[in-house]
Image (cartoon, rainbow, N blue to C red):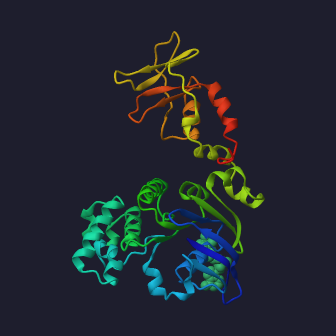
């Protein structure tokens, strides 16, 4: 657990970057600091590993004031990932990843073996290990940055806009990869971003900061979207938060109709039992369909599937893509208002 207790940072020129910030970052979860440019996200993050020292207040890492730990020792237990990876340009990828193990005095063979294992873990081909950073794409460099931060298996990971410099497709895959890794590793992660969509996707907890480094709201993503604390948070969340909230409701709440039809329409299945399209009664052409995975997807995906279908009904499939049932408009009509309740409120 990382605890901010009344932390203030005033820079030499009088700028108050962070103002009396108190919050807790729970162990084993992802806490995202999000907010507009200049709201003190990076300053807050860097005070954890003492790249910046607080002016007032204290930061506790598992009950120890970070000011009482010398920075090199502190940083050995804290991985750090920044935008554009910050790799050493003249070191091969494998040696970039092994940086901290080398510093810790591991022998070269063991450090390199660890680096190769991590490259695989973050989804990189180990053939890239002998290359230099400039020979990798931006997305690949970011993965190397994550691998490097994980090399000494630190319990805490600080990530400062790590995926901001890559295109949206690569960014999505890096985010998915981080979620996959985190499900396995359960690190205590503090992640800084200015992108609210990234924040609600990655965060178990989201701290919204306002300029001046003051905490506007700390909540889990579903609660944040359901109950923004004030007009600033509401504005920052954007206009379609009603739809985005549906991402946090599992589609499994929907009652399925087992028969592959709704009035006026039927689902045509292929020989493996996978949906091939909708057919209108009396028609013979196949029309496109939307489907959702009944176990994995959210109410948002189910609604999207219904909106894409000419019948207005969503097709549910199992993990193998086989027909599992139909969600009628009536079922959706009933489920959507119920999704307004904040999860956890019963
Ligand atoms: N070394 C410094 N000296 C003076 N002011 C600084 C210094 N570093 C940052 N600041 C100011 O402190 C405030 C917070 O900066 P910080 O970089 O923490 O914000 P941020 O939320 O991470 O912003 P961004 O999203 O634009 O990176 C800003 O007003 C910034 O100009």
Relative height, residue 258 to residue 290 (above, below):
above
Above or below, comparing residue 245 to residue 91 in the picture: above
* Image quadrant where one finds the C terminus: top right
In which quadrant of the rendered view does residue 117 lie?
bottom left
Location of residue 67 by image quarter:
bottom right
Which residue of the protein is positioned furthest toward the front in this rendering?
Answer: 63
Residue furthest left as drawn = 109
Which of the two residues, 334 or 42, is positioned nearer the viewer here? 334
Q: Nearer the viewer, residue 254 or 132?
A: 254
Please say whether residue 243 is visible from this viewpoint: yes
Q: Position of residue 25 (x, y in %)?
A: 58, 68
Q: What residue appears at the point 65 percent right and 25 percent down from the top-left corner?
A: 330
Q: Position of residue 55 (x, y in %)?
A: 66, 87
Report whether 79 appears left or right of 340: left
Q: Quadrant of the N terminus?
A: bottom right
Determine the residue positioned at 34% across, 66% down.
Answer: 136
User: How many circles with numbers are drawn on the protein?
Assistant: 0
Q: Position of residue 252 (x, y in %)?
A: 54, 36
Residue 131: tell me if it is visible: no
In the displayed structure, does residue 114 sit left or right of residue 16? left
Quarter of image, ligand 1 = bottom right
């Amino acid at each position: 657990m990382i605890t901010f207790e009344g932390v203030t940072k005033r820079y030499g020129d009088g700028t108050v970057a962070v103002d009396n910030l108190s919050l807790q970052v729970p162990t084993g979860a992802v806490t995202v600091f999000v907010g507009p440019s200049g709201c003190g996200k990076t300053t807050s993050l860097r005070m954890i590993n003492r790249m910046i020292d607080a002016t007032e207040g204290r930061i506790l890492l598992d009950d120890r004031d970070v000011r009482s730990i010398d920075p090199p020792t502190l940083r050995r237990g804290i991985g750090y990932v920044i935008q554009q990876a910050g790799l050493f340009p003249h070191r091969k990828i494998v040696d970039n990843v092994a940086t901290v193990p080398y510093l810790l005095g591991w022998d070269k063979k063991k450090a390199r073996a660890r680096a190769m294992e991590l490259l695989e873990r973050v989804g990189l081909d180990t053939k890239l290990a002998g290359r230099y950073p400039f020979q990798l794409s931006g997305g690949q460099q970011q993965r190397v940055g994550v691998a490097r931060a994980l090399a000494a298996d630190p319990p805490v990971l600080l990530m400062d806009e790590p995926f901001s410099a890559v295109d949206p497709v690569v960014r999505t895959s890096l985010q998915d990869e981080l979620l996959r890794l985190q499900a396995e590793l359960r690190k205590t992660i503090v992640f800084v971003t200015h992108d609210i969509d990234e924040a609600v996707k990655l965060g178990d907890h989201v701290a919204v900061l306002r300029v001046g480094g003051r905490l506007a709201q700390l909540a889990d993503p579903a609660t944040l979207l359901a109950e923004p604390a004030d007009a600033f948070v509401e504005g920052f969340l954007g206009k379609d938060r009603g739809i985005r909230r549906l991402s946090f409701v599992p589609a499994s709440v929907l009652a399925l109709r087992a028969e592959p039809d709704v009035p006026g329409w039927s689902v045509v299945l292929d020989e493996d039992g996978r949906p091939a399209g909708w057919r209108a009664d009396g028609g013979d052409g196949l029309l496109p369909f939307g489907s959702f995975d009944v176990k994995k997807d959210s109410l948002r995906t189910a609604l999207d599937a219904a909106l894409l279908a000419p019948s207005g009904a969503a097709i549910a499939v199992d993990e193998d893509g086989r027909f599992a049932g139909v969600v009628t408009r009536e079922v959706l009509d009933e489920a959507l208002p119920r999704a307004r309740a904040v999860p956890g409120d019963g």
